[in-house]
Image (cartoon, rainbow, N blue to C red):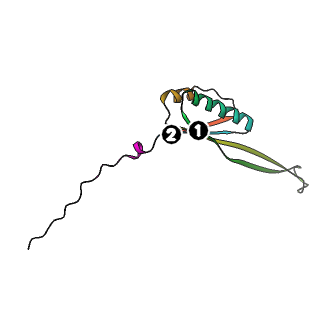
Amino acid sequence: MATEVKKKAPAKPRAKKAEAAAQKLRIKVRAYEHKVLDASVKQILDTALRYDAKVAGPIPLPTEIKKYTVNRSTFVYKDAREQFEMRVHKRVIDILEPTPKVIEALTNLSLPSGVTIDVKMV
């Protein structure tokens, strides 16, 4: 009684995830004033397009609204209240396959105060 041993097919070489997925630079921009935010986004886009980078965006994200209610009076008149709100406007810009020149130009970019930027390699 001879038993046959089945051989497996040779394994195919797999591409690594880092090679398969193209690198991209994700820039999240936040500000309280939308005009300052749009000016900053335009400045970032101009810098990226100057070095022939592929750009996706700006993509507007939902505005984050924080509401605060306070009493007008310190001790009495509970019914008299004031409401305040802070709006945080947000945008996302993706730079596909960034070159070192683009990254260097973006790091040297000076943006107005009140604009927060988060840069991430995805």
How far separated are the C-alphas under marks 2 and 1?
14 Å
Q: For the residues carrying marks 2 and 1, which lies nearer the camera in this image?
A: 2
Q: Reading the chain from its start, which is encountered first: label 2 or label 1?
A: 2
The residue where tag 1 is placed is 118
> Residue, x 67% and y 35% (percent of image)?
115
Question: As shown in the figure, which amino acid type bears the numbered disc 1?
Answer: Asp
Tag 2 secondary structure: strand
In this figure, which residue is indicated by the disc labeled 2?
24
**At x 19% / y 61%, what residue is drawn?**
7
Q: Position of residue 4 (x, y in %)?
A: 14, 68
- Looking at the rendering, the stretch of residues picked out in magenta corresponds to 11-20
Q: Main secondary structure of the magenta part?
A: loop
Q: State which quarter of the image contains the N terminus.
A: bottom left
Q: Is residue 20 left or right of residue 76?
A: left
Look at the picture and state if 105 lies above or below 80: above
What amino acid type is highlighted by mark number 2?
Lys
